[in-house]
Amino acid sequence: QVQLVESGGGLVQPGGSLRLSCAASGSFFRLRAMGWYRQAPGKQRELVATITSGGSTNYADSVKGRFTVSRDNVKNTAYLQMNSLKREDTAVYYCNAALLNRAGLWEDAWGQGTQVTVSS
């Protein structure tokens, strides 16, 4: 069984910064892409940023220039550095990973989410 555990969320003032972490653990062969999604109250879950195992990144237009996604392939951990946070960044942030499980099948795994609140 695979677990994705997020950490680093919290309350921050507009203009502030937070760094989220997502650690993958359990029984799997390898990870492919990892990513961050978010869901604000009353809205659909949306992509924030993704990163491949080779380090290629993709960002939502709304976070380009403010957020940076990275990963440590040895630690099976992804990070999301969030700078210049805005009130509209308030949401539950979810980690996602495409992984090759022990049955030899690719599957999608999700974390339980971490709350990010941007407020003065």
Image (tube, rainbow, N blue to C red):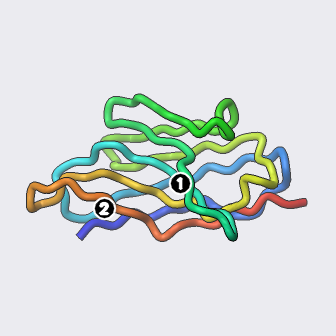
Tell me the amino acid under the disc marked 2: Ser
Q: Nearer the viewer, mark 1 or mark 2?
A: 1
Residue on which the image places disc 1 = 37
Q: Residue at x 9, y 61 (%)?
A: 103
Q: Residue at x 53, y 67 (%)?
A: 113
Furthest residue to the left?
Answer: 103
Residue 70 in percent (x, y) is at 48, 38
Q: Give the mark count.
A: 2
Q: Residue at x 17, y 58 (%)?
A: 101
Q: Earlier in the sequence, mark 1 or mark 2?
A: 2
Residue on which the image places disc 2 = 25
Report crowding for label 2: few under 14, some 14 to 19, many 20 or more residues within 10 A (C-alpha). some
State left or right for residue 113 relative to residue 100: right
Q: CA distance from mark 1 to mark 2?
A: 19 Å
Tell me the amino acid under the disc marked 1: Tyr
Tell me the SS state at disc 1: strand
Residue 84 in percent (x, y) is at 77, 41
Closer to us: 23 or 31: 31
